[in-house]
Image (spheres, rainbow, N blue to C red):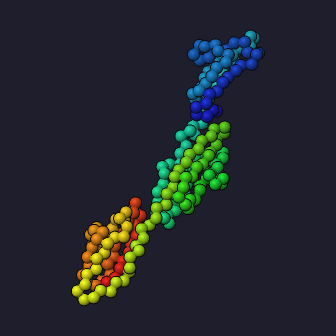
Amino acid sequence: LICEGEEFSLELGTDIVGIEWFDGSQDANRIFTQPGSYPFTISNGLCTSDSTLVIDVLDIATFSLGADIAVCEGEDVLLNIEDEFDSVTWSDLTSESTLPVFTSGSYYVDVTLGSCQASDTVDVEFIDTPVYTGVESIELCEGEDYLFELNNPTYSIEWFDGNTSPVRSFDQTGIFQFELSFQGCEGDFQFEL
């Protein structure tokens, strides 16, 4: 059993006087880098014996935590190791198969299986939910209009009636609802005239 990218070196003892491999070669010392079954015949000068060398490769080099993660503030993030490993060590030195994440940052994990090792890092970003800092109740004089201007140009807005203008004039009383969004995170707000 070897790790991906490693090699296995076979060296015969001094009591072996002859070997013949499946491909006809007679190398007493041979290096293997690929998985497979390798038949051979050995001799000590008196007796011969047929045998097969079986090499398996542990491929944990392809281990991955997946793509970087961006979620809205308040959502749950749980990093998960789905495969079985002999040991798991996260960036906070815990050794469970899962790691709950509560703050933005880079998180790495080292895993081992037999003598094979792999590691990966994933960036987690918690995106702030939009905040409305305007007034919630406005009193207007008869005949006066209210001009709403979105206070953050990085936000998108959608009004109760589907309008998406960040600047809007209102000339009647009522409760006006709107949704603010930023990088896929949304918040519902309203104000009253």
Q: Give the residue drawn at x 27%, y 88%.
A: 141
Front residue of 27/66: it is: 66
> Left of 137 or right of it: where is 39?
right
Location of residue 48 in the rendering, given as x and y in whole percent from the top left corner: 70, 14
The count of marks equals 0
Q: Please tell me in which quadrant of the rendered image residue 150 appears.
A: bottom left
Looking at the picture, does residue 127 appear above or below residue 16? below
Q: Is residue 167 visible?
A: yes
Location of residue 16 in the rendering, given as x and y in whole percent from the top left corner: 73, 15
Q: Is residue 47 visible?
A: no
Quadrant where the N terminus is found in the figure: top right
Location of residue 148 in the rendering, given as x and y in whole percent from the top left corner: 31, 75
Looking at the picture, does residue 104 appear above or below residue 140? above
Front residue of 144/86: it is: 144
Quadrant where the C terminus is found in the figure: bottom left
Location of residue 171 in the rendering, given as x and y in whole percent from the top left corner: 24, 81
Q: Please tell me in which quadrant of the rendered image residue 8 appears.
A: top right
Front residue of 174/116: it is: 174
Q: Residue extending furthest bottom? A: 142
Q: Residue extending furthest left? A: 143
Q: Give the residue drawn at x 26%, y 79%.
A: 170
> Left of 101 or right of it: where is 43?
right
Q: Please tell me in which quadrant of the rendered image residue 100 appears.
A: bottom right
Q: Residue extending furthest top? A: 45
Q: Give the residue drawn at x 53%, y 40%.
A: 62
